[in-house]
Amino acid sequence: MTTLLAHIRIKPGKEAKWEAIMADMVEKTFATEDGVLRYEYWKGEEPLSYYCLLSFRDKWAFYHHQMSDHHESHDFADVLAGIRLEYLDPVKGAGGGLPPTLDPPLPPDASPELATAQKRFPLTIPAWWAERR
């Protein structure tokens, strides 16, 4: 399973366009992807700050999402001022029923799209998580 929190900053004046993109992304993600567990967008307290909580069946489902037509078709450069992806791992007994985030190796028969996604979005599994699982 793969869960992450996207820390997002939007360019001034682009809030309405960003929120329309997010509504479209959520609708198309749930309509076309079977590996998505959670996909939610939130406004932060700071102006122009947003968050996305994403959880997928596995890292491959996340990579398929990132490389999907509905993800690739939006002009994110027009609205994004910055984004940082932070991989998350549930606290045992308090993680909303989500399984741990895992980083299996890229299979030898992986498609070029999965290989590209692996390079763009490598998982970061901190060593300290192991002792807390």
Image (tube, helix red, strand yellow):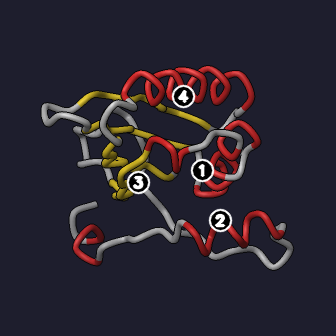
Residue at mark 3 to residue at mark 2: CA–CA distance: 20 Å
Q: Position of residue 10 (x, y in %)?
A: 34, 41
Image depth: mark 4 or mark 2 in front: 4
Q: Which residue is disc 3 drawn over?
A: 100
Crowd class of label 3 (few under 14; some 14 to 19; many from 20; radius 10 Å): some
Q: Which residue is disc 1 drawn over?
A: 62
Q: Earlier in the sequence, mark 3 or mark 2?
A: 3
Residue 21's disc number: 4
Amino acid residing under circle 2: Ala
Crowd class of label 1 (few under 14; some 14 to 19; many from 20; radius 10 Å): many
Residue at mark 1 to residue at mark 3: CA–CA distance: 14 Å
Lateral position of residue 83 relative to residue 91, left or right: right
Amino acid residing under circle 1: Phe
Q: Earlier in the sequence, mark 4 or mark 1?
A: 4
Image depth: mark 1 or mark 3 in front: 1
Lateral position of residue 23 relative to residue 89, left or right: right
Amino acid residing under circle 4: Ile
